[in-house]
Image (cartoon, helix red, strand yellow):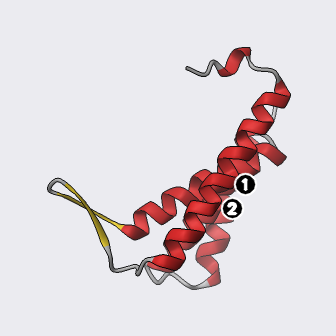
Amino acid sequence: MLHLQYMNALTKKILLLLIALLTTGSFIYISIAFSPKITLQLYKLHIPIVAIVLLLLFISITSFGSFLLGKRRGILLAILGDGYLLLRLFNYTHPFYLLILIMILAVIEFSFIK
């Protein structure tokens, strides 16, 4: 079991980069190889492939963002990326919705400043 509190900073960065590269590769492979209409069936549960792609994209952006900018900003960057794609998925394509999303994340970012 990995105990992240006992790992040094370099090991954490290497682990984040490895996770980011693996999830990015999986994201690219799944988005190219499978149609968005395919659902993954686990027992009686049907999971759309779009949900898996968005989850992989979220993990990938979080890992890259945490590697480059820090944990909190990596998560906010991933929320911005997935939020934008979800807005596009539900046909909220007006730029005002993107502006609202950016403003909400900016307020969250500024609320954590000490």
**Helix, strand, or loop for circle 2?**
helix
Q: Nearer the viewer, residue 94 or 2?
A: 2
Image quarter of residue 101: bottom right
Residue furthest out toward the left:
44
Image quarter of residue 23: bottom right
Residue 67: x %, y % from top left: 79, 44
Quadrant of the image containing the N terminus: top right
- Residue 50 appears anywhere in the view: yes
Residue 22: numbered disc: none
Whether residues under marks 2 and 1 lie with C-beta atoms below 8 angstroms apart, the answer is yes
Count of marks placed on residues: 2
Q: Residue at x 61, y 22 (%)?
A: 2
Q: Please say if 56 is above or below 1.
A: below
Residue count near mark 2 (Cα–Cα under 10 Å), binned few <14, some 14–19, many ≥20: few
Residue count near mark 1 (Cα–Cα under 10 Å), binned few <14, some 14–19, many ≥20: few
Residue at image mark 1: 106
Q: Please say if 24 is above or below 34.
A: above
Q: Residue at x 42, y 70 (%)?
A: 50
Q: Nearer the viewer, residue 51 or 29?
A: 29
Q: Nearer the viewer, residue 78 or 8?
A: 8
Left or right side of 4 for 54? left
Left or right side of 17 for 90? left
Residue 103: numbered disc: 2
- The amino acid beneath tag 1 is Ala
Residue 22: x %, y % from top left: 63, 53
